[in-house]
Image: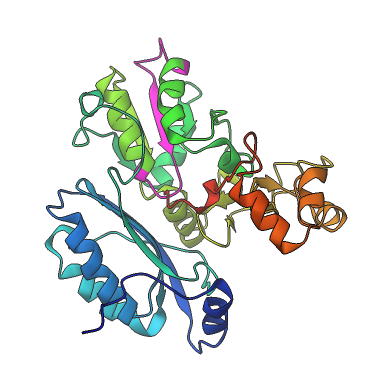
Amino acid sequence: MQQEVLHNRLSKEELQRQLDQEDFERKTVSFYRYVRIEDPHYLRNDLYRRWSDMKILGRVYLASEGINAQISVPEPQWDSFVTDLNSFKPFVDMPFKIGLRQQKDSFLKLIIRVKKQIVADGLPSEEYDIENVGKHLDAEEFHCALEDPETLVVDMRNNYESEIGHFEGALCPDVETFREELPWVRKKLQGKEKKKILLYCTGGIRCEKASAYLRHHGFEDVNQLHGGIIAYAHQVQKKGLRPRFRGKNFVFDERLAEQITDDVLSECHQCNIPCDTHVNCRNVVCNLLFLQCEKCSEQHGGCCSEKCQNRIQLPEEKQKKAEKKNFYSGKGAVNSRCKLPVS
């Protein structure tokens, strides 16, 4: 009997070819839920079978504590997908955050992985109570809270996300991981436990953990943007509100960002002109995520440095040898941070 394949075996080129041949639109959607899952490994295989049949693409993390998903669903399969998800008791009436525009290029394949946590935070379980989180605010309530000059606004995303877009007046931690961010924020807010705190992130999941963490450590008035920037963008558009978030919202798929306003808040990392376009270094051994303008992309061949530019000029066999030796051991070493499903 032939063994069932529960992971992708096609090349990137073949996957792109299949995607280009599709004659239907797709919805990019993210969702999460902290909920007890008894057997994440069994659920992983079950979901993979079901969602592969629906031609769903994307990246999903499962753990005993819940699910964190960012996927691309064919529009003709949308109702079937929702019905199927509701057939799992832990996922009934899941709130979805849908991308601002129809996108076919968000994902190339389906990846479902079982992890220890759906968002890695490095916290011992006694450092927070996920059932004791902050107050959830919609866009209008968030705007109202922003009017108080004593309110503290905190961006619970990483520095490469906030550099291209953030809320006006927000505290943006200069860190690259959520694990680093939690103690950084707590230290910065020390002595302000009675102040009103507003937290926001991409889709809400990091704020759930962050608000629980801050409340556990004595912060009394902790609030979070419900549904994150993704839901916020839909609400301000629908209600005709002036966005208080400026620039782009970084997203963890092939698009890398969604435009919220036309403001360009960041600079090209190579020539310092205004630029908010993230790319990965063309040297796959490096793969550094950085900001690069069109002129620098052409001048440097899509690479982050002269060293990487020289490396990609080598014959393919020499490049492979360099990769096996893990050529880079410092900045930029196998940096795939933009490929992680975080919302």
Residue 205, by quadrant, is top left
**x, y (%) of residue 108?**
50, 71
**x, y (%) of residue 314?**
79, 57
Q: How is the image coloured?
A: rainbow
Inspect this view and state whether residue 204 appears: yes
Residue 197 on the magenta segment: yes
Q: Where 282 sits versus 118, above or below?
A: below
In this picture, residue 266 sits left or right of residue 73: right
Q: Main secondary structure of the magenta part?
A: loop
**x, y (%) of residue 100?**
51, 64
Q: Residue at x 71, y 41 (%)?
A: 266
In this picture, residue 304 sits left or right of residue 184: right
Q: Where 312 sits versus 27, above or below?
A: above
From the viewer's side, name the closer residue of 161 and 270.
Answer: 270
Residue 149 on the magenta segment: no
Q: Which residues are magenta?
A: 188-205
Residue 231, by quadrant, is bottom left
Extreme-top residue of the structure:
191
Q: Where 120 sits versus 241, above or below?
A: above
From the viewer's side, name the closer residue of 289 and 330.
Answer: 330
Q: Quarter of the image for the N terminus: give it.
A: bottom left
Q: How many marks?
A: 0
Q: Where 32 sits versus 269, above or below?
A: below
**x, y (%) of residue 275?**
75, 48
From the viewer's side, name the closer residue of 204 and 301.
Answer: 301
Q: Residue at x 65, y 35 (%)?
A: 331
Inspect this view and state whether residue 166 appears: no
